[in-house]
Image: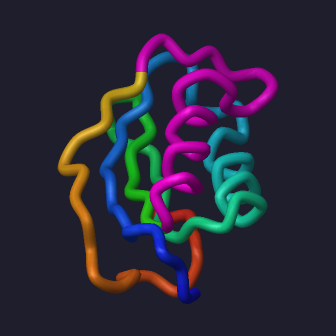
Amino acid sequence: MSTSQPLISVDYEVFGRVQGVCFRMYTEDEAKKIGVVGWVKNTSKGTVTGQVQGPEDKVNSMKSWLSKVGSPSSRIDRTNFSNEKTISKLEYSNFSIRY
């Protein structure tokens, strides 16, 4: 992936009705469509958390999806993004669901 854009990494946590609604599966599909890498998992407190890495525009597309779209039966109340930083290379080879 040679690109003039900087690669960025960002952590996220999605609040709302995001467990038991195929949120992780849709997140994985969307990440693969957009072309970003990272991971997603459910937390014990009812949120979904993870990390996204890729070119800035693709990460921004994923951030928008995580904030506004989600899976068809989910309800996103808010999404927190943290630890956004520029990285020299991707730390993951794909996007996966963690358990």
x and y percentages locating residue 33 in the rendered image = 77, 61
Q: Quadrant of the N terminus?
A: bottom right
Q: Residue at x 77, y 21 (%)?
A: 73
Residue 88 within the magenta-colored segment of the rendering: no
Residue bounds of the magenta highlight: 55-78
> Does residue 85 appear to the left or right of 56 in the view shown?
left
In the depicted view, which residue is nearer to us: 6 or 63?
Answer: 6
> Does residue 20 appear to the left or right of 66 in the view shown?
right
Q: Residue at x 39, y 70 (%)?
A: 7
In the depicted view, which residue is nearer to us: 34 or 57?
Answer: 57
In the depicted view, which residue is nearer to us: 28 or 7?
Answer: 7
Residue 34: which quarter of the image? bottom right
Q: Residue furthest front?
A: 4
Q: Residue at x 60, y 44 (%)?
A: 61
**1 shown above or below 49:** below
x and y percentages locating residue 45 in the rendered image = 32, 30
**71 shown above or below 52:** above
x and y percentages locating residue 63 in the rendered image = 50, 39
**34 shown above or below 94:** above
